[in-house]
Amino acid sequence: MNVSPDTDAARQALDGLLALLELEKIEENIFRGQSAPISSEKVVFGGQVVAQALTAAARTVPPERAAHSLHAYFILPGDPGAPIVYDVDRIRNGGSFTTRRVVAIQKGEAIFNLSASFQVAEDGFEHQVEMPDVPPPEKLDDERTRHRDVLRQMNEKERDALSDKTLRGLHARAERAWPVTFRPVDPQDPLRPDEGPPERRVWMRAAGPLPDDPALHRALLAFASDFGLLRAAMRPHGLSFIQPDFLAASLDHALWLHRRRFRLDEWLLYDTDGPSAGGGRGLSRGQLFTREGRLVASVAQEGLMRRRKRDA
């Protein structure tokens, strides 16, 4: 317990993610980013596009103006084998706030759009909700370890009973090194998830030390905030991403950054809930706290939650 598997591989995955955020400037307001199959699916992970789009927007804003919110829509699945062009529209440069709109284009089609707002440093009223009382990350296993344990404890009969898609998904989640480490407070069996209240709490941290650039930490938090957020809305129904008859996908994503400075290479608690599901969609919300209990960001996302249609 408490030892992340394949530390070197995770560090390499983090370096790969940092490389993805080094966008190429094609011309004024237009940037190109590379893609990679970060998740186990054969599409671009949504958090990658969010992080790259926010990075592109920030490249057109003075560094003293920090991103404080973004709102985005996922339009089409991205191809991890092809680059993505980010077209930034400089909507407004105000006295205190700057607004940018970004369209992500792949193979001539818009696959994603984002609006982001940036603000100068400003004093103001302050308050926040309290952080939940949960075990520290040192007392918890990371998510890859949980998936490896499930595979190791499975007998041959149980393996044979699984569909190829489910088994591939389980192996991918157990073997793939992630640039961010996740340690669930209340881990679920991915094959037999229990039905419970619409909530999920997980500690997260980058898989290694990061540079001191605050804009980079904001982009990486945007990346990580898309991971597993919909699970809070899935839990009352006993659903898992690797179930062969279940289809899930992010539809939109919103992020509010309450603090200008925080570090993603230090543990953050991601406290999420799923207040509603209906019409083939589920809504999840999240709050991110430092270990000291400081609220640094809030998140909301609506996602597709659909039973796959079986062939007649």
Image (tube, rainbow, N blue to C red):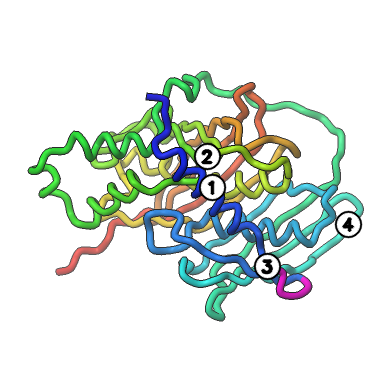
Which residue shows up at 57% across the image and 30% down it?
267
Q: Are the two marked residues, 1 and 3, in contact with CB atoms closer than 8 angstroms?
A: no
Distance between mark 1 and mark 3 Cα atoms: 19 Å
Q: Secondary structure at mark 1?
A: helix
Instruction: Residue 207: give x, y in percent of width and height.
Output: 52, 39
Q: Are the two marked residues, 2 and 3, in contact with CB atoms closer than 8 angstroms?
A: no
Q: Measured along the vertical axis of the image, is residue 220 above or below residue 75?
A: above
Residue type for callout 2 = Ala
Q: Measured along the vertical axis of the image, is residue 47 above or below residue 137?
A: below
Q: Residues within 10 Å of mark 3 (few under 14, many from 20)?
A: some
Residue 24, numbered circle: 3
Residue positioned most to the left:
157
Distance between mark 4 and mark 1 Cα atoms: 35 Å
Q: Earlier in the sequence, mark 4 or mark 1?
A: 1
Q: Which residue is mark 1?
A: 14
Q: Which residues are magenta?
A: 24-28
Residue positioned most to the right:
95
Q: Which residue is mark 2?
A: 207
Q: Is residue 23 magenta?
A: no
Residue type for callout 1 = Leu
Pick the front one: 72 or 151: 151
Residue type for callout 3 = Glu
Which residue shows up at 42% across the image and 46% down it?
177
Q: Is residue 25 magenta?
A: yes
Pick the front one: 125 or 9: 9
Which residue shows up at 20% across the image and 64% down it?
310
